Structures are given as structure tokens and as C-alpha cells.
Image (cartoon, rainbow, N blue to C red):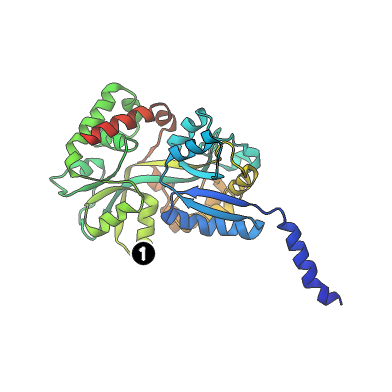
């Protein structure tokens, strides 16, 4: 009698536990990053909580989020955004405030992870990537990227002002520590656009993160700006693509909760789950993006650490993206870039 009741009681207990299970809509940039999130966050979260997670792919279109919030018809619960968007969207009232105490202990996380309306998801870099099978001499930095005589051929660059203006100034001789102070002046911005003029006819623009590795493998470009995780994913597939870390810009992507999201509490629980040392270690094992939880690094071996943008060897010659600069000046610079690109 007891043994026959056990399955019934177990089913009842599970039903009670999942009775209030919800459905969470998580929005990210797709590709290798989404696959890594699925393995490290989405599937384990669903299994441990009984909540269903629906993943939606986008390409950073904040206009969609803004339209939802203003219409008070918010269908997204949690969105991965780039750092430059967090401050602006927060100031515009498009995002919920983040209560760090619901995520974890503040001192467990890198300082940059904690923002008023966002919480760090991972650290990544935009770097100079190239195909080592097609380019026998490794480019040393952005001056080589601009040198079309020494390295003839097209260059891949992401459509937009952000990162490209910094790279242009470094190619023009500015040191990585000087970039944002120079870019904060009108003369510095003018010089950055003038430097981009030199390369304009040799640029093949990209928008989606999957494109640069495809361009490099196909030989459409000889070098490209690229997310380091995309190179990592291509290397795992056997492609001989390589990275020049010098002059790369490392940055964070953030989790944000749209204002008026229907499942705010569940979104906070997902962030907390994804921010544990265990989950972040699992994630970094699937794609070479750095954790925001300091304890995750303690779980890593040398090989894993050496692939991350935040490793000692890789970060020393890079620039940290200035979130405040792009929050303050991003809109005007992107408008200028759009006008420049259309000429």
C-alpha cells in the first residue's frame, strides 16, 4: 500500500511545487552566446524551478523595448543589452531598478556589474580578428588594421560609431589610456572621423556578430573587428581564426528588466541564478566571455582563463569601454556616424 502511494505522493508534491510556475521571456543577441546561455542558465533554471523560459533573439533594437514600455504592452521580461544603452534607457524611465540584494552579495561581483537599472551578465571584448590561414603575418594592432598597403584587402567593421571611433584614434597614434579624454573633445571626434575616412572604401560593414567570422573564413575581409566569443566559437569548430588583443575594448553586457514587465520577480530570480559562481563557470566553459562573479574564476583552470578577455595577459593592453561617455554622447555620435556613412 505504501509503495503504491509513493509515486502518487511524489507527483502531488511536484505539482504543488510547480503550481505557481511561470513563463519567462528572455531576450538576447542569439548565436554562440545564446547557445552558451541555454546550456548554463536556461535549461538548468527550468529544471530546478519548473518555470518555462522562452528565448527571443534580437539585434539590440532598443526602439522595440521603448515602444513596448510606452504602449504599456511589455512582452519581454528580461533583456540583454550593451552597456551604452543601460544609462540612457534608465534615464528615460524604460527600465526597472535592480535590487542587488535579490541577486547576491555585493562584494561577490566585479564593481562594474552593479548599475542602477542593470546587472552585469558577462564581460566581452571587441577585438581585431584575422584568419591565420590566409594572413601569415599577424597584425599587431589598429595601425596595421588601417595599413592597406602592408595588408591589402577589405576590413570588416561593425556599423556604428561606438568602438570604431576609439579604434580610429588608436590607429592614429593615441594610447589606449588617452582615447576617451581625446574623444571628449570636438577636435578628437573630428580626427576620429577623418581617420575613418582613410579606410572607408575598404570597409565591409557588419551588424550581426556571426558575420565577421563568416567574412574571415570566406576571405571576404583580411581582418575584422569581432567579438572575442565569436572567434572562440569558430575555433571550437576547427577554424584557424586568431585574435590580436592589443587595443581591444572590453565591456559588459547587462541584464535589464523593462519597466512594467509582467514577470519582474521571476526575472530577478533568473538573474540571481545566472550570476552564481557555478552557473558563470558553466557559461564561460561554453564561450570565452568573462564572469562577473569573482568566485567563478576560482573554479577555472589556466586554459579557460587564458581565453577570457579579463585574463591578466589579455586585459593589460586593452581599453575598458567608458559607459558614461557613451551614455552622454552616444546618441549624437551615432547620428553623426549615420550621416557620415551615407555620404
- Would residue 336 appear left or right of 91 to someone viewing this image? left
Badge 1 element = loop
Q: Which of 220 and 237 is in front in this view?
A: 220
Residue 213's spot in the image, x, y percent?
31, 55
User: Circle 1 is placed at which residue position?
Assistant: 237
Question: Is residue 225 in view from this perspective?
Answer: yes
Q: Nearer the viewer, residue 28 or 99?
A: 28
Counting every numbered tag in the picture gives 1
Q: In which quarter of the image is the C terminus?
A: top left
Residue 237 lies in quadrant: bottom left
Instruction: Examine the rendered structure and indicate whether residue 2 appears above or below residue 282.
Output: below
Residue 232 lies in quadrant: bottom left
Residue 52's spot in the image, x, y percent?
60, 56
Instruction: Examine the rendered structure and indicate whether residue 316 appears above or below residue 189.
Output: below
Residue 283's spot in the image, x, y percent?
51, 55
Residue at x 43% of width, y 48% of height: 58
Q: Residue furthest left?
A: 149
Question: Is residue 131 in view from this perspective?
Answer: no
Residue at x 35% of width, y 26% of height: 181
Residue at x 52% of width, y 51% of height: 297
Q: In which quarter of the image is the N terminus?
A: bottom right
Residue at x 43% of width, y 33% of height: 323
Residue 254's spot in the image, x, y percent?
50, 41
Q: Nearer the viewer, residue 70 or 144?
A: 70
Crowd around label 1: few <14 · some 14–19 · many ≥20 (10 Å): few
Amino acid at each position: 500500500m505504501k509503495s503504491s502511494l509513493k509515486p502518487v505522493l511524489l507527483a502531488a508534491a511536484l505539482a504543488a511545487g510547480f503550481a505557481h510556475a511561470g513563463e519567462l521571456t528572455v531576450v538576447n543577441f542569439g548565436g554562440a552566446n545564446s547557445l552558451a546561455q541555454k546550456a548554463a542558465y536556461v535549461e538548468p533554471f527550468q529544471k530546478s524551478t519548473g518555470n518555462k523560459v522562452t528565448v527571443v533573439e534580437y539585434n539590440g533594437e532598443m526602439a522595440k523595448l521603448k515602444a513596448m514600455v510606452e504602449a504599456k504592452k511589455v512582452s519581454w521580461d528580461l533583456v540583454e543589452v550593451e552597456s551604452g544603452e543601460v544609462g540612457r534607457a534608465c534615464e528615460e524611465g524604460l527600465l526597472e531598478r535592480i535590487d542587488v540584494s535579490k541577486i547576491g552579495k555585493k562584494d561577490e561581483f566585479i564593481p562594474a556589474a552593479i548599475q542602477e537599472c542593470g546587472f552585469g551578465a558577462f564581460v566581452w571584448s571587441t577585438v581585431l580578428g584575422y584568419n591565420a590561414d590566409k594572413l601569415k603575418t599577424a597584425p599587431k594592432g589598429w595601425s596595421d588594421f588601417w595599413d592597406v598597403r602592408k595588408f591589402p584587402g577589405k576590413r570588416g567593421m561593425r556599423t556604428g560609431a561606438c568602438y570604431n571611433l576609439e579604434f580610429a584614434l588608436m590607429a592614429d597614434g593615441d594610447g589606449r589610456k588617452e582615447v576617451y579624454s581625446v574623444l571628449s573633445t570636438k577636435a578628437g571626434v573630428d580626427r576620429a572621423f577623418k581617420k575613418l575616412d582613410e579606410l572607408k572604401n575598404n570597409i565591409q560593414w557588419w551588424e550581426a556578430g556571426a558575420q565577421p567570422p563568416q567574412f574571415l573564413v570566406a576571405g571576404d575581409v583580411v581582418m575584422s573587428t569581432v567579438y572575442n566569443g565569436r572567434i572562440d566559437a569558430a575555433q571550437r569548430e576547427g577554424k584557424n581564426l586568431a585574435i590580436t588583443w592589443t587595443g581591444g575594448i572590453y565591456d559588459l553586457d547587462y541584464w535589464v528588466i523593462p519597466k512594467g514587465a509582467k514577470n519582474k520577480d521571476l526575472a530577478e530570480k533568473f538573474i540571481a541564478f545566472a550570476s552564481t559562481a557555478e552557473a558563470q563557470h558553466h557559461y564561460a566553459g561554453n564561450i570565452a566571455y568573462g564572469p562577473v562573479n569573482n568566485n567563478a574564476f576560482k573554479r577555472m583552470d589556466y586554459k579557460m582563463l587564458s581565453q577570457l578577455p579579463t585574463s591578466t595577459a589579455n586585459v593589460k593592453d586593452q581599453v575598458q569601454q567608458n559607459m558614461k561617455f557613451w551614455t552622454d554622447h552616444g546618441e549624437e555620435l551615432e547620428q553623426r556616424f549615420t550621416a557620415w556613412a551615407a555620404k
